[in-house]
Image (spheres, rainbow, N blue to C red):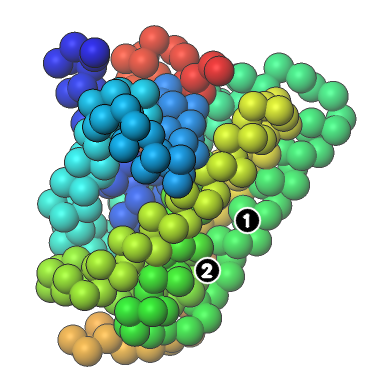
Amino acid sequence: MKPVGAWAGVYAKGLAMGLADLVPGVSGGTIALISGIYDELVATLAGLDGRMLGAFRERGVRSVWQAGNLGFLAVLLAGIGTSVFAFAGLLHWLLANRPAELWAFFFGLVAASVLLVGRSVTDRRAGISALAAAGAALAAAITSLPPLIRSDAPLFLAAAAAVAACAMVLPGISGSFILLILGAYAPVIAALNNLDFVRLAAVSLGIVAGLLAFSRVLRRLLARHRTPTLAVLTGFLVGSLNALWPWKAQLRELYTHSDGRIEWLLGNRWPAGTEEIWPAAALALLGAGAVLAIDRIAGGRGPDRP
């Protein structure tokens, strides 16, 4: 049984993961990795299968709850859910009105995460380095894709959420960014703001389906090929910095929201002058400092060891 302080820590990490998953370009998996709960999260998700239902009937709820580590998952999901509902409006406003500052903070957060995750990859052979480079190239390519389609149909949102859920547990590939590419990000944020329970239920079902399927694959990779997998994940973090570059140029108009707000296809640009550099640099350092603080609190473990 975890002490109260440990449960509070799990809840706080869930809050941070939920906040990260709301921002296109940042993955909740990054927070899980640097805070030392990544392996526990993947193993717990992978353990949710049909056999658990039979175990409930044979051994009772309490026994299976403990054996399946469901208390950890429940507290973590409570933190994620709290963050999503509490901060969706704020993140929506910051993305619309202060995007450079928000991206700068998360750029620093992810850049510092590269160092923390990369230190666990002690094998420096060419093959491992090539995997890291491939991961970086893949993440950079994904984060460079323009949005494809846009729909708020529940079935489409469920399918998009299932794909995005796979990215949610991958450090460096943002579930929110996948939703943005698929054209589902704005409808999901609108559903959160409007408490549209039909669409939120569809999104929730998609997330659950995607997590349950992908977590099993990820658990096998971490168990059998840990170093190569961590090398690829480190590359994902490096490649995701492409999406978090603070200074963006509006390339072309994509569509107009019902409130008149225009959605643009964005590309990276250099800052216009020092008046743009210093606020972003300060916030990037703040993000990096936050990661180092999380790592220190976690005992310098993350990513956690099997």
Q: Residue at x 39, y 58 (%)?
A: 207
Residue 43 vertical placement versus 99 (above, below): above
Q: Which quarter of the figure has residue 262?
A: bottom left
Query: Which residue is disc 2 drawn over?
Result: 267
Kind of residue indicated by mark 1: Ala
Judge whether residue 273 can be spotted in this image.
Answer: no
Residue 112 vertical placement versus 87 (above, below): above
Of the 4 image quadrants, the one containing the N terminus is top left
Q: Residue 85 carries which label?
A: none
Residue 221 vertical placement versus 164 (above, below): above
Q: Residue 109, percent across and down?
A: 41, 36
Q: Residue 140 carries which label?
A: 1
How packed mark 2 is, by other alpha carbons closer than 10 Å (few <14, some 14-19, many 20 or more), is: some
**Of label 2 and label 1, which has the lower sequence position?**
1
Q: Residue at x 23, y 64 (%)?
A: 92
Q: Residue 30, percent across and down?
A: 45, 38
